[in-house]
């Protein structure tokens, strides 16, 4: 049985909206996904029935809320096949997850002159934290170049590896090009040289099965809101052996075992990295989002989204002066494009008037824009609730805009 989008769309109340009198066509899923009713209801349920601060109270509600948060951690552990729930750190999102590693890993594992390898297609969230560490810890950044069709090559990664390389930090899927990087090969390569590898899975965890043990990565970062869960929650996966070696990133309650004015003994994993009251409502709702994805089945999601990608690519290519940016062999359901002579911002605004939500601009990847020689692009990104009909509306919308110019 393949996905039944008719039924699925019924789970997402926002999709029935009209925008400027037109049915909403939401094609900005790489920015954030919409939420199914089960996730929305779970948030209401937690606040209505078990709300209490976690890990602190002996009272009934606190026990229930703690259990709910810790069950969510186990759900995440299962989803990415981590060996232990101690390896699942809840953060506020992919951005904070990468910042945590940059701060804590560089502080404990790097010395001035050591090198971090990233790629040209990174989101700012996997560039700027390393630049800040360049100023604080003296690490240097090496950048893997981009090949013609929006791919990176393993040999280009290897070329940059030196005795000073301390970490390779690479996105699994580019939020602009849709390129799916060969992350298992990259971790194998890194490990051949004893170098740990961080995978930014912000754009993959909702589309592709992730198995951190098969991938053999050392860190994996992602956000809940891009995988049908609530905003404000994210995950950092890290191997227990590395996380044990790293100092806390933030300090306060929850991350301590014992405090005197003279010194503090830090809590054990994963709490060492979760200072302050965690978003236990968000984590619980993320667990619900994962169950929603699992019920549909990632294999079916993948097949359906691949179909949408092919369909959309074929239809868009029929438009005169259409330029699709990012044509890698392995590609996720993200299409960046430009129509010659029309500024992406103008196109985006006019499509919005027709109820079509696409993203325009640099997509928080300005160095990639520089490498591509463009100021920005339009980007349509698809989820399992999108349909061929919506892609037709997008294509007709673009044609209308072309006629206006
Ligand atoms: N990309 C986009 O429209 P946060 O903001 O922490 O949830 O995710 C950051 C992030 C990290 N890595 C990649 C590859 C991403 O795509 C993103 C977020 C959104 O493309 C918002 S800029």
Image (cartoon, grey):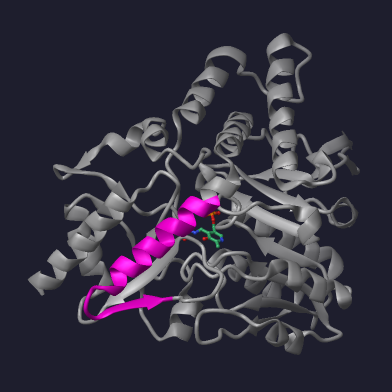
Residue 384 in view: yes
Locate residue 164 relative to residue 405 in the image: left or right.
right
Instruction: Determine the residue positioned at 58% across, 41% down.
Output: 297
Image x and y of residue 147, in percent: 55, 86
Residue 314 placement (x, y as % from top left)? 34, 69
What segment carries the magenta color?
302-325
User: Is residue 278 positioned above or below 371 on the image?
Assistant: above
In percent of the image, x 71 and y 78: which residue is there? 117
Q: Residue furthest top?
A: 60
Can see residue 217? no
Q: Residue pushed farthest left?
A: 404
Q: Residue at x 32, y 58 (%)?
A: 358
Q: Position of residue 392 (x, y in %)?
A: 25, 57
The answer to whether residue 374 is left or right of residue 237 is: left
* Residue that sits furthest to the bottom in the current view: 159
Q: Looking at this view, is 11 or 103 the one in front?
A: 11
Front-most of 320 and 369? 320
């Amino acid at each position: 049985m393949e996905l039944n989008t008719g039924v699925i769309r019924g789970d997402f109340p926002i999709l029935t909206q009209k925008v400027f009198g037109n049915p909403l066509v939401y094609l900005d899923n790489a920015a954030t996904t919409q939420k199914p009713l089960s996730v929305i209801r779970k948030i209401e349920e937690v606040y209505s029935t078990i709300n209490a601060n976690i890990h602190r109270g002996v009272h009934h509600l606190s026990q229930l809320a703690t259990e709910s948060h810790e069950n969510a951690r186990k759900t995440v552990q299962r989803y990415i096949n981590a060996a232990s729930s101690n390896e699942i750190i809840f953060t506020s999102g992919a951005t904070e997850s990468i910042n945590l590693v940059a701060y804590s890993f560089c502080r404990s594992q790097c010395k001035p002159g050591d090198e971090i390898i990233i790629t040209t297609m990174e989101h700012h969230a996997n560039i700027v934290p390393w630049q800040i560490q360049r100023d604080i810890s003296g690490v240097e950044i090496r950048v893997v170049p981009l090949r013609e069709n929006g791919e990176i090559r393993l040999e280009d990664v290897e070329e940059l590896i030196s005795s000073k390389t301390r970490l390779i930090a690479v996105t699994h899927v580019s939020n602009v090009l849709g390129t799916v990087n060969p992350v298992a090969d990259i971790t194998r390569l890194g490990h051949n040289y004893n170098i740990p590898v961080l995978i930014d899975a912000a754009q993959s965890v909702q589309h592709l099965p992730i198995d951190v043990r098969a991938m053999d990565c050392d860190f994996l970062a992602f956000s809940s809101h891009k995988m049908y869960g609530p905003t404000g929650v994210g995950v950092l996966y890290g191997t227990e052996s590395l996380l044990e070696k790293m100092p806390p990133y933030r300090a306060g309650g929850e991350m301590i075992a014992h405090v005197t004015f003279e010194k503090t003994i830090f809590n054990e994993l994963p709490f060492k990295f979760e200072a302050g009251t965690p978003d236990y409502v968000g984590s619980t709702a993320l667990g619900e989002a994962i169950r929603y994805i699992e019920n549909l089945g990632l294999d079916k999601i993948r097949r359906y989204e691949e179909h949408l990608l092919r369909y959309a690519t074929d239809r868009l290519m029929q438009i005169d002066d259409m330029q699709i940016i990012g044509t890698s062999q392995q590609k996720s359901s993200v299409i960046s494009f430009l129509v010659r002579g029309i500024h992406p911002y103008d196109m985006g605004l006019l499509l919005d008037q027709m109820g079509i939500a696409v993203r325009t601009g640099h997509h928080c990847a300005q160095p990639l824009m520089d490498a591509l020689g463009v100021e920005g692009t339009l980007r349509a990104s698809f989820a399992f609730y999108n349909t061929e009909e919506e892609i037709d509306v997008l294509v007709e919308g673009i044609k209308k805009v072309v006629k206006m110019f």
